[in-house]
Amino acid sequence: MQEILNFLGSIPWWGWIIVAIALVAIRDIFFQKKHTISHNFPVIGHFRYMLESIGPELRQYLVANNREELPFNRIERGWIYASAKQENNYEGFGTDRDIYTHQYIFINNAMIPYKVKKEHPNKDDKTFLPCAKVMGLPKNRKRPFRPRSVVNVSAMSFGSLSAKAIESLNKGCGLSGAYHNTGEGGLSPYHSNGADVVFHFGTGYFGVRDAQGNFSMEKMKTLVNDNPFIRAIEVKLSQGAKPGKGGVLPGKKITPEIAKIRGVEVGKDVLSPSTHTAFNNVPELVDFVEDIANETGLPVGIKAAIGKLDQWEELAKIMKNTGKGPDFITIDGGEGGTGAAPPAFADHVSLPWVYGFSDVYKLFQKHGLCDQVVFIASGKLGFPAKAAMAFAMGADCINVAREAMMSIGCIQAQICHTNKCPAGVATQKKWLQNGINIPLKSERLNQYFRTFRKELLDITHAAGYEHPSQFNMDDVDISLGDKNLTQTLADTYMYHKEKVDFDSMQVLKDCEHIGSIDNGKLNTNND
């Protein structure tokens, strides 16, 4: 035995490297059967898999140019990061974008911009920008709601995002006056830190389900009564990343905390069906919306990605004939998605926002319903110019998801579905979440939203308007990519949006239904 130890001790350090390489080569050739490359090219074949595993990072930081990456390029991410950190978010030496490319946006400025007078609300607060419409007011809901911010956090649930990420988003919304959509994972303690909340649920009815997994009106009423900061309710019909598809939450991911919030059993797989059990058709959907609104007193809306239009036509006709239906409609673009989805769904099912929204808006316009509904836009619209285009097309508010995630630290690693998010945003691993400093990150969301609203207002004033709701379809041109020609949104999508009833920013500020104030406390004038 001593002789063996002496022999091993006499081997130099580089000899051990040779031994290790030889063992790997023997394993590759004679034992492993899964990988052809490492079998045919022992040892060096492993470098191929190593480079493949870090390929996205190499392309993101070393290979791709500033405007090349998807879903968000380096310039877009840089603007969000700089805005959130209150750093210089300008660019020098002119634009580096190809302004002749297909579907490039041109906002038509006025010869004489809008002038903010001394007594104007934006004189002291250049970020004050409420929604021009009031949710629920046309249908006389008991508790109407005017969002204090036109830019808000879209549906992202606790479970999909980490506890610290949700708390950072909620506190940031409270600081900026925005509302926070819960996503379909139920209302968690992390949603209760100062912001107005839109309670969102889907086919799993998490947080408002009975023992059999069906919708419970009693639990909904209790939830709303116990949490007065819930200002509206959103029923998810579908979402941009995977419309028409359900999902499974594995039992191993269901902690006691998540089980309590969602109303499910610990350790047991939970199915989110592809369809609702509370209603089976459009008339039943309308009745369902009305029942919730009547029982809770809150505005109730629906969220959907857009494909076929026949059922939307049916919905519009019912709303026209009965005066019933959703108070707001969130149109989610097929380009969206913050969690996991099959590529076939994420890449090919449902229309991009600009096509889906224009189709639905024209249907509601045809039936004279546009003034009865608050239209919320969602789908890579977290930038001032894109938001201006959305308002020109008829949107009343913007919901942002991935852009909000980036403001609190997301680096677009695109591994949200693996539970290994390096920024701690889209993971349930505690040690990865530890890097999130909640006070710092909440302030960064606050600053991103305020910068967004300020720059959107700057664009609005440059176009000669006081509020983005005044944008119309002739204020924005789109490049056709053909002989360098452009045409207006009106000519491109073949409609003119309905004029929004807007008096002045001061009227919005004085509204009794306006949402939370800027320090995160609730506006007590609403109830």
Image: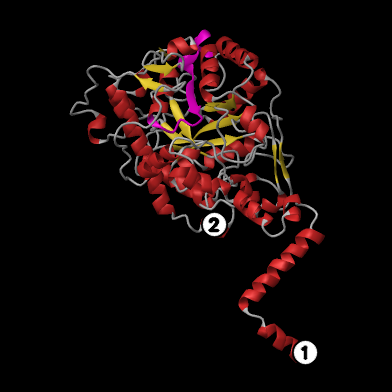
Q: Earlier in the sequence, mark 2 or mark 1?
A: 1
Spot occupied by residue 66 in the image (x, y as percentages of width and height): 43, 38
Give amino acid for label 1: Met
Q: Mark 1: few, some, or many residues within 10 Å (few <14, many ≥20)? A: few
Image-based side of 103 in relation to 215, left or right: left
Judging from the image, what secondary structure is the residue with disc 2 in?
helix
The answer to which of 16 and 129 lies nearer the viewer is 16
Quarter of the image where the N terminus is located: bottom right
Give amino acid for label 2: Leu
- Nearest to viewer (mark 2 / mark 1): 1
Q: Is residue 71 above or below residue 61?
A: above
Q: Residue at x 70, y 32 (%)?
A: 274
Q: Is residue 71 magenta?
A: no
Judging from the image, what secondary structure is the residue with disc 1 in?
loop
Q: Which residue is mark 2?
A: 432
Q: Is residue 107 above or below residue 31?
A: above
The answer to which of 304 and 17 lies nearer the viewer is 17
Mark yes or no: residue 100 visible. Answer: yes
The answer to the question of whether label 2 and label 1 lie on touching residues, with beta carbons closer than 8 A, is: no
Spot occupied by residue 259 in the image (x, y as percentages of width and height): 66, 50
The quadrant holding residue 118 is top left
Spot occupied by residue 344 in the image (x, y as percentages of width and height): 67, 31
- Per the model, the C-alpha gap separating discs 2 and 1 is 46 Å
Q: Which residue is mark 1?
A: 1
